Amino acid sequence: MGTGEYVAELPVARAIGRLLPVSFARALAWIAYAGALGVAVVLRVWNLDALGYNSDEAVYAGQAASIAGIPELTPFFPVFRAHPLLFQTLHSLGYLVWQSDLLGRLLASAFGLGTVALVFGIARRLYGVPTAALASLVIALMPYHVVVSRQVLLDGPTTFFATLTLYFVARYSLERRPALLYVAGGAMGLSVLSKETSILIVGGAYAFFTLSPELGARLRHLLVALGVMLAVISTYPIALRMAGHASTGGNYLAYQLFRRPNHGWLFYPETVTMAMGPLVLAAAGAGLWLLRGRSSWRETLLLCWIAVPAAFFQLYPVKGFQYLLPAAPAVAILAARTLACWRPARARVLGGRVPSRWLAPVAVVGVLLSLALPTWERIQPRSSTTFLAGAGGVPGGREVGRWIRTHVPQGAQMLAIGPSMANILQFYGHRRAYGLSVGTNPLRRNPAYDPLPNPDRAIRTNEVQYIVWDAFSAARTPFFAGKLLQYVRRYNGRAVRTESVASSTRTGAQVRRPLIIVYAVRP
């Protein structure tokens, strides 16, 4: 069944055809798509540089700076760490002309905007222009996608290339041209070069073709597509070997396999569900049941794209807020399908019978508002003392780092609670910083971080001259925060710089709560 036939049989399409000229209805849909792009731009650049980088942003921007050969950052951020380098390499090109935090975030936002356009393209081919316009609005407004795509993280570019892969797989399923499948393999390779965890999408594609024998996909075509993907991916291990860092990937894999869980079993249901939008997820799920009579390989494709990564990361002990982002476009399309295609004859509202034509607009407005309001709130600058990795910038980090660059002598070294704040201090302060929580056991620590085997001796021998306490790390690891403050007291720590935020007590009084404190210590 082609897209045109699919759309023509839907009740909403027939209703629009009776109420409005077809050309006018299509024009409205294209206007809605243009509006979605405009909204996507605004939400992804508003207050974009209000806060400094978080730890992951500092690492990826630092890698880009090292690739670009910026001498101030090269000693602190090696080019080869944990992940492939596609995004960092693109970022490094910009560093050659403009060294700014805004640069990396604009690049990440551009990938986010591209994903919005791809969602429209996929939904248009699968379900028609009205559904596509709604899908682009949903992904443009979704807090999950907006928040992550505003940051210098690998997940935004990964999601773009994974969605590009979905676009070409959908086109192949409609047109049955093998060349489209080969291009999908290349796009999948670029997704893996952005972040290796996106290899899970291959499992989703395998499940889709296995469950959709009616498409008649030939094994040799699938193998060629797989070969194209592997050829693209091979550029990264080749670069590792040529640079003499062939063991980097293996060290990081060992760390990921043996590290302790960082969140509980309910982390994704509690956090990502709210970030994607409960009404969006409800609409996507409801449509699978309400429109079951029209189900085809289209829904199988979208569900496989969601289910395989979601199942893996739910079972995998290490959780990350942004890990499930590649599934968000497929969720948005399924939700838009429900909103555009389901139209009951009548329904009871407030005890009376109302025409069904009011239900669809009310549902659409309700879903979009449920996304727009929390998204707008999330992109405002925050001064909280708590922080969720992947959810935004870190208040005070850039300011303290720049103070360190100006006031702390060259060659001085610092000790922070953990590697997260240490990364920020090194990026902005250009001084070596260690994390107290970084252990010496190579199976229990990220191999990208250097431990300080004996912090007490390092302070006594004047190898470390400054200790940095921060509220974000202290909330996550109170044991190491307490240990750090013991060193402050033992070695006559004197606060030389404090970043604080206004906060209200239970009685309503306004107080200043410290976010980051830099202590000078001496033996």
Image (cartoon, rainbow, N blue to C red):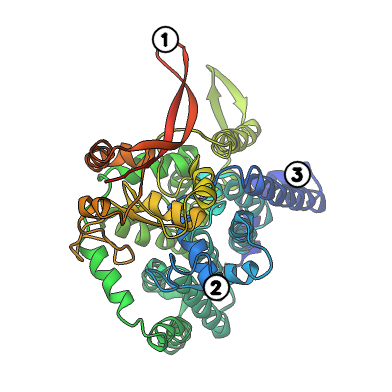
In front here: 235 or 143? 235
Can residue 324 be seen from the camera position used here? no
Residue 497 to residue 21: above or below: above
Dot 3 alpha-carbon crowd within 10 angstroms: few under 14, some 14 to 19, many 20 or more: few
Side (left or right) of 285 relative to 418: right
Measured as percent of width and height from the top left, residue 290 is found at 47, 45
Spatial CA span between label 2 and label 3: 53 Å
Residue occupying the point 49% across, 63% down:
62
Among the two numbered marks 1 and 3 on one chain, the one whose residue lies closer to the N terminus? 3
The disc placed on residue 18 is 3
Dot 1 alpha-carbon crowd within 10 angstroms: few under 14, some 14 to 19, many 20 or more: few
Residue 239 to residue 397: above or below: below
Residue occupying the point 49% across, 79% down:
185
Among the two numbered marks 2 and 3 on one chain, the one whose residue lies closer to the N terminus? 3
Circle 2 sits on which residue? 89
Do the residues bearing badges 1 and 3 touch, measured as CB atoms within 8 Å?
no
Measured as percent of width and height from the top left, residue 192 is found at 44, 72
Spatial CA span between label 2 and label 1: 51 Å
The disc placed on residue 507 is 1
Spatial CA span between label 1 and label 3: 61 Å
For discs 2 and 3, the disc positioned in front in the rendered view: 2
Measured as percent of width and height from the top left, residue 324 is found at 41, 55
Q: Which three-letter amino acid code belongs to the residue tagged 3?
A: Arg
Side (left or right) of 26 relative to 210: right
Q: Which three-letter amino acid code belongs to the residue tagged 2?
A: Thr
